Every structure is written in structure tokens, then in C-alpha cells.
Image (cartoon, rainbow, N blue to C red):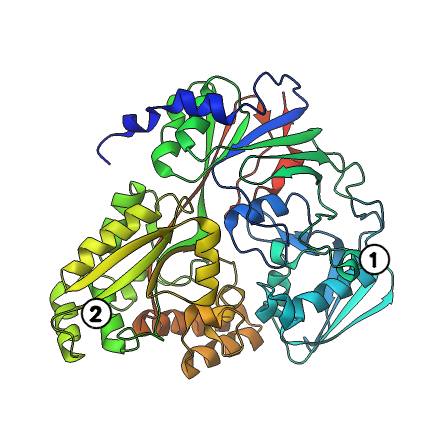
Amino acid sequence: MTSKFRYFLGATTAVMIGLSAVAGHADAANLRMAWAQDATGLDPHKQTAFSSLRLLELIYEPLVRLDADLKIIPGIATSWEFAADGKQLTFKLDPKAKFQNGAAVTSADVKASFERILDEKTGAANRANYLSIESIEAPDAGTVVFKLKQPDAPILTAMTDTNSSIVPASEIAAGTIGTKAVGSGPFKLEKWDPNSKAALVANKDWAGGATGVDGIEISVLPDETAILAAMRTGQIDFALLNDPLIATLVPNEPKLQLNRAPLLAYHVLQLNPARKPMNELAVRQAISCAVDRKAVLDTASLGEGQVTGPITAPFFASDPNSLFCYKQDVEKAKKLMADAGFADGFSATVIAATGEPPTAAAEAQVLQSQLAEIGVKLDIKMMELNVYVDTWLKGDFDMAVALNGGRPDPYTMYNRYWTKNGNLQKVSNFADDTLDKLLQDGRAETDPEKRRVIFAEFDKQLAEKAPWIWLYTGYGYTAQQKNVQGFVPMPTGSLVSLGKVTIQ
């Protein structure tokens, strides 16, 4: 990666091909948008790819949302209240909330949605966050009561997630979730041609008020240089960019604006402790000591980010320098390998997804070079995103380069991986009594400062046990024409504020 200029080679041809669906479009009431990676599916409860969540959050809504400061604000619910003992959570729904089929959103839909999430057969991504729910009551159409087995401080934060969106009970009964998209969000999905384009139209019944545009036309252009070239010629109004090599070029364009915000999502090398020799603590720790995290960040992402420990939420995050072996120590790594009986190293395969993130291949190559210093011979296997996600969910890998979502609360961020009942236990392949207890303690504690202490210990323990090697957090990038107004960048990477964007 010696020159940014090479990224423009062939961009003109790519734009001509990729924009055939929108070229010549002149209706300013529609936002012409592009991104490099399309959604992999339409089920809001099951999708884990960032590209899927970015599309689905424009169609569906959860009970509550996060704002740009990570504060909880109304979604479908207008108010909420915990009982004094912390074991009951009551929501009042917005009486104006309607699904895009015209039906009112009622407590029956909320109850059915959460029962679907809790059903193990669904395979819901957020299921582990709701295991404290004992029952769900719907005393009237506008009220929902969650009765909990124990106090659960982070459950409200969990409910802000797109994976906790409210879907119509009628669509659940019909078995059409994932084949149709019927939400209550700012836009309806009018058409979706996977890996090509999508057309969204404004939901005139959206309880959030009138949208700023009549619709959004989304083009999928796998080459982000083509996206930037299209923006330079005015064919695209707004774009989601993932590649820092491209994003850092945007400020050079006088007609364009770059939005850049620190993300909670983290880049990580996931080890599989269920496979030899990663089942050996000393081997995992050796890999941690051998990795120069700053070099990975600087090479793969132009230094656009921060080295991170496991917890990325600002309130709970530890200083990475206080964590185990966060300064590269190759000699210590070699000794740990020898102590584990692998002085001559071993061979393994690391999987990475093509395009999500765009830095994945570069990260894998830097890690391959660094681990070679302690005799670990890495074979890099690149996969299309849908294949990678399926493989990842099965835990069918030696190692995986990943970009995982962060959360403002450590419990909702990690319980699905590191508790014994976590629904992504197959991905982590690591059960540990200490980690499980710390997460449960942090879940039940309501005092913020006491929770901070609990999760600082969790951070320390996770880094020391090294089932994964946390690398860095990056930035979320969007680019827009300067006549596009009202977009608010989010630390979660959310694009939900497109519901209020206008074109001047």
C-alpha cells in the first residue's frame, strides 16, 4: 500500500457499470446513496453483518434507541420505568406508531417479537441479553410489562439494538420474517436486488414525523474508489465508506464533506480455544505477546483509530497499557511457546471476509508476518461475506480476523460470547467461570461506579486469558455532497438519522 493514487485506477469504468441503475436520475427529493457491501438478509433478529443492520435500521424500530451521546431515547416506546426492586420494566408505546402495512404497533407485537427472540429455534443474535425475562405481559394495547427473574441493569441498553426490533405479530405467525420487510421505521423497502441496488420509500405513517426525503436509492458498488468517483461527478449524494484509505481522500474534494466518528466496534483476531494448540493458555498468551497492535493499526488503517482492550465503551474502558502483554514482547512470546511445547511453532488457518471490513486482508497479512516471528505459520483464507458469516457462526475456524460490534454496556456487548448460556458460545468456544461470574455480577449491580470496577476486572481477565487478541477501534466514515444536511454520525455506526436528512 504505497500510494493512495492507485485506488483511482479503473474507477471511471466501475462507476459507469455500477451506477447504471441511477445514472441520469435528477429527482432531488430522493437521496442517491452508495455503499460497498450489501445486506446479507432481511431478518432483523438474526442478521449480524454490519451491512445488514445498516439497511434494516432504516426499516425497523426497537422500543428505544441511542442518541449520538449514547443516551437512551424513545423509539416505539415513549416512556419506560423500572420497578423499585429492579425486577419489572414497563413501557408505554407511542399511540402513533404504525407498521408499514398500516397496522398499529401494539403490545401484542412487542410480546410476540421478544418471544421470537427468546425462542432458541429462531437463532436470534440478541437472545442472550434477555435470559432474565420471566414473562411478558400486555395489559392493554399500549402497555408492555417485562417481569424479570433478577435485577438487570443493561437490559434497557440491549433493547436499543436493531437485533431487538419490533416486528408484526401477524408476520411472525405467517412465517414471513426475513422474506418480507415490514417495520415501523422511517422507510419502506420497495425493492431489493441483492448485491446490486435497493429502493426505499418514505413511510408516511412513521411516528417519528415526516422524513426529509421521499426515498433513498441505494447502489452497491464493491469498489469504494468507484463510490468516491461517483460522488466527485455528482452522481451520488451520500455514501457509507469503510476503507480509511478512501475516506481520508474525501477532504481533498471541495464539493464533499467527510463525517468521521470514533466507533465502539473493534477489530480483533479471534482464536479458537477449542482447537489445538489454541486450547493451551500459554499459546494464546504467546500470540498476544507477539502481536504489535499499533503496527496492525498503522498498516491496515493508516493509524485511523486507537489500540483497544476488550471493552470499548468510554465509561468502562481500561487503559490498554494496563492489560496483559499489550506491548509487543517477542522474546516472552517465544518462551511461552517453548513452555507449552511448541518451540518450533505450528501451522494454522486464519479466515477473513472480503470487503467487511476492507482492512481485513491487510490485517491478516500483518498478523501473518508478526506471528511468523514465533514460528506460527498462518495460511490466510479469504471468504465472501455470507460464507464467512456462516463459517464464523459455526465456530469452524482456527483463527478469524473480525470486526465485531461494540455496545455502550459491557454486559450486552459480551454476554453472548463469554457466558455459559451465551447464544454465540459456538463462536467464542471458551467457557470460563471467572468471566461468567463477573458478567453476571455486572448485570445485577445497579451502581455505575461499582459496575465500572467489576468490568475493569473483566477486561483484565479477558485480556490475560487471551481467547481473542483485541487490536483496535477505528472510525465510522460517511461522505456527502455539501447540499445534504442533517446527518448525525453515531459511535455505533448507525445511519438512522437518514430519516431526517434533507437535500438543500
Image location (x, y in percent) of residue 36: 47, 37
- Please state if 96 lies on the left or on the right of 314 as rendered: right
Type of the residue with mark 2: Ala
The answer to which of marks 2 and 1 sits earlier in the sequence is: 1
- Please state if 376 lies on the left or on the right of 437 as rendered: left
Image location (x, y in percent) of residue 19: 52, 24
The quadrant in which residue 454 appears is: bottom left
Q: Residue at x 14, y 64 (%)?
A: 374
Q: Nearer the viewer, residue 293 or 191?
A: 191
Image location (x, y in percent) of residue 62: 68, 54
Residue on which disc 2 sits? 286
- Residue 428, compared with residue 28, is above or below; it is below
Q: Secondary structure at mark 2?
A: helix
Q: Residue at x 33, y 69 (%)?
A: 463
The quadrant in which residue 281 appears is: bottom left
The circle drawn on residue 304 is none
Q: Residues within 10 Å of mark 1 (few under 14, many from 20)?
A: many
Judged from this view, the residue extending furthest toward the right is 140
Q: Nearer the viewer, residue 487 or 297?
A: 297
Residue on which disc 1 sits? 106
Image location (x, y in percent) of residue 271: 33, 67
